[in-house]
Image (cartoon, coloured by chain):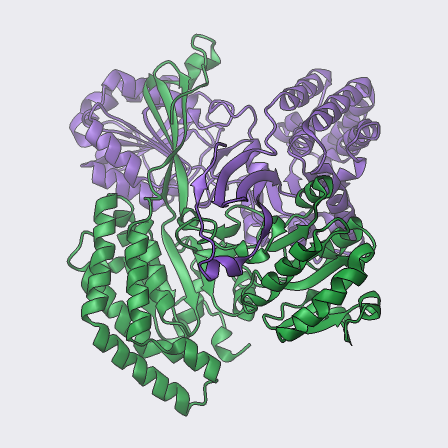
Chain colours: A purple, B green
């Protein structure tokens, strides 16, 4: 952990800024859908017409970072050229066309004659967003926040300082001609104030981290504000003895290699011993042709896995072309291994046996449990949410891939005509508890 | 805060006990509805046939507490005679007849031909319950936990030690003849292990506190595990200038006096100045006849409120026959006051003006916002949930009165037939994202 990870108490100035965003977010939460959508389109237009300023600011960040010896991978993530910016602008327009997450009635019930209850979605309030390197994350999160009626306080990486400041000023410029107050968004820039964002309980309702596992874990450990995200994604694929082996091979390759740096790629392959010989005879060369380094337990080494997996391998998210392989003697042993080493992200089983599939889907307590398909489908866009705010591995909802619905909560509204509890306590009136049409 | 509020790291023994409950809860989560209901009925039978043992154990607690000088109010809460026990047993039977909260499909969608996604409710895992004095809380929470497929680790007050141990042993005895493992429940008894329950992140999924505001606030401040509950309930009632004054009076009296010790009773009455004179002329004597002590700001004192409210009064939950009264010049001033002093529990407006009612219901970000009815309706039973796990004032769901649905989460299940992401990335196959019947 580097120095920027020190959490200090929020300064008076930061508390005041957070209060300003909170006040603006209260107004934003009451603005209608058309006005929020129109604000998004104006934000997009503003970015398009100031593209040159943003790209220039980004060039400054790139030059400084190069001179400071930033790694090539980070520089690639930091770079925001016209093409990437155009993508991000299209992203805003897409978010504007998503269905409104606010004002959705989830429950509608007559409690008694003339007394009706409804549960309606409302914004959370203020989002706290901490993101590393990629400055287009700022654009995406700001648009998701405004779309869902939330204010946002954002903290980007210091590498992207100039880019982030330029983007934020362009977004605020755009908002200033809309019904959404430009005070709904704020960007933290100094290192000192940065992570005291984590201490703004009561002013910030949800923290969204976008960055490395280390950053996410640090944030989860250092705030009482709910965090939407996940640290590790140690996903498992179990090939059952009753698997269609051609299907098993194709799903294994896809789950590992289709994009190995993704959190929903598998890190461990569990293979039932009955089909291990036949399956691994084909799987090992196929993986190796794809450049995958294979590590295994003793049993799987006996079937040709070249290197030994160490104890720590089973719990590791490689995010790379490395795969641990373990041969198990039963579904139960596979479940036990997943329970021990899994991160409750996504696990899959390949089998033609429906009973065993059901057992797996019931017993594994990950946010995603899949049957006969690749773990790579665990994704908000692939689930059809239209946007992905993050993937959460916590127990309480929202969990799994989270769309705009992760940025709203609900409120109960009760409409009466002079109804008092005493009349019901005395028996003079009675509850009807009749569900009404949503 | 007394000594029992010290949080220490969990002992190895506690971690092992929590692991045992967690393992049992995994099995419990896969047991079908009929078996869980039948386990509840057996728990009820076991309590009924061991009623004498429990009442005897309770007498021991009562005698010890009396000799230790426990307050009369606490002794009353501690007392568990046959009548109260019978009530608690009936409560279990009611919980058994509630609709199953598990296995409910919340989302069902075809992602592509032959690839279908569903989101299904599943248990949380293990509940951590900390409750004071009232030993019948143990019976209620244990039944809610088993009904929703969750294990529970419970810690009661030391005053009720003998009663709680007796109840737990009777419940476990009952469970031992059912499909639900008696290891699904565990009772912590020693002071040392008690609150280290709050440090069992990863083993306990949700903390449910049942006790004083001070206890709840302490717990919220000392755990990273999500807490279902609320500390303060500083509820407001605003009487608008366009109120039906007879209705306003009746709702005011009910909201304050129908049960003043409840969290959903009001602590502050906000009165629009245009009707303050007429309204307070009737309201003041009516409140006083009911024994309500009235405190007010300068303006309301001018209308006859006898005593001055101090600055700290506006933020205080009296839980008693005391009411602060403030005269405001506009709806906006009322909203500002609620925003400043409210605890986001429940607030109500009395008005015949629909536009102002809508504004109030949109602007107040409490979990309950009511129009023309008493705040006392903010309750899981009155909402028709059949049970109340607690009332939460946090922002994220579940909030407000929470029924059994607060004890479940969900899991995504994806069913395919060899589907891999690469085919969709290449454009060979396309997502259909078609909602299917729930």
Residue A426 seen in the figure: yes
Q: Quadrant of residue A128?
A: top right
Q: Is residue A14 left or right of residue B131?
A: right
| Image side of residue A288 versus residue B212, left or right | left
Residue B201 versus residue B61 in the image, above or below: above
Who is closer to the viewer here, A3 or A398?
Answer: A398
Q: Is residue B294 left or right of residue B425?
A: right
Q: Position of residue B330 (x, y in %)?
A: 81, 51
Q: Is A409 rendered above or below residue B373? A: above
Which quadrant of the figure has residue B308? bottom right
Q: Residue at x 39, y 48 (%)?
A: B124
Seen from the viewer's position, the closer of residues A113 and B376 is A113
Q: Residue B46 at x, y = what percent?
A: 20, 65
- Pick out the residue farthest to the bottom: B67
User: Percent position (x, y) of residue B326?
Assistant: 77, 63
Q: Residue furthest top?
A: B428
The image position of residue A39, as x and y in percent, is: 75, 26
């Amino acid at each position: 952990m580097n120095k920027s990870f020190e959490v200090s108490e929020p300064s008076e100035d930061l508390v005041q800024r957070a209060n300003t965003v909170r006040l603006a977010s209260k107004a934003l939460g009451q603005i209608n859908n058309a006005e929020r959508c129109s604000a998004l389109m104006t934000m997009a237009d503003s970015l398009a017409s100031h593209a040159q300023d943003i790209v220039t600011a980004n060039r400054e960040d790139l030059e400084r970072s190069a001179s400071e010896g930033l790694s090539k991978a980070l520089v690639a993530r930091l770079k925001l050229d016209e093409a990437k910016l155009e993508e991000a602008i299209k992203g805003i327009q897409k978010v504007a066309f998503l269905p409104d997450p606010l004002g959705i009635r989830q429950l509608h019930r007559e409690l008694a004659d003339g007394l009706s209850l409804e549960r309606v979605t409302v914004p959370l309030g203020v989002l706290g967003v901490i993101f590393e390197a990629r400055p287009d994350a700022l654009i995406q999160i700001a648009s998701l926040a405004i779309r869902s009626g939330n204010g946002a306080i954002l903290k980007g990486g210091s590498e992207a300082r100039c880019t982030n400041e330029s983007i934020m000023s362009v977004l605020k410029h755009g908002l200033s001609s809309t019904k959404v107050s430009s005070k709904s968004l704020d960007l933290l820039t100094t290192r000192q104030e940065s992570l005291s964002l984590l201490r703004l309980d009561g002013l910030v309702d949800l923290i969204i981290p976008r960055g490395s596992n280390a950053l996410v874990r640090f944030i989860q450990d250092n705030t009482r504000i709910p965090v939407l995200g996940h640290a590790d994604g140690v996903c498992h694929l179990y090939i059952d003895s009753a698997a269609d082996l051609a299907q098993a091979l194709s799903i294994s390759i896809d789950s590992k290699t289709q994009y190995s740096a993704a959190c929903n790629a598998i890190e461990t392959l569990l293979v039932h011993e009955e089909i291990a010989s036949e399956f691994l005879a084909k799987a090992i060369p196929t993986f190796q042709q794809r450049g995958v380094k294979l590590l295994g337990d003793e049993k799987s080494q006996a079937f040709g896995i070249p290197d030994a997996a160490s104890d720590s391998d089973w719990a590791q998210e490689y995010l790379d072309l490395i795969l641990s392989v373990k041969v198990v003697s039963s579904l139960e042993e596979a479940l036990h291994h997943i329970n021990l080493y899994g991160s409750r992200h996504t696990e899959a089983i390949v089998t033609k046996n429906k009973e065993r599939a059901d057992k797996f889907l019931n017993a594994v307590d990950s946010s995603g449990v899949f049957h006969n398909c690749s773990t790579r489908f665990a994704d908000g866009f692939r689930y059809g949410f239209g946007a992905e705010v993050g993937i959460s591995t916590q127990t309480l909802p929202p969990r799994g891939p989270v769309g705009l619905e992760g940025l709203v909560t609900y409120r109960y509204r009760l409409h009466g005509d002079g109804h008092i509890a005493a009349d019901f306590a005395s028996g003079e009136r009675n509850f009807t508890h009749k569900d009404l049409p949503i």
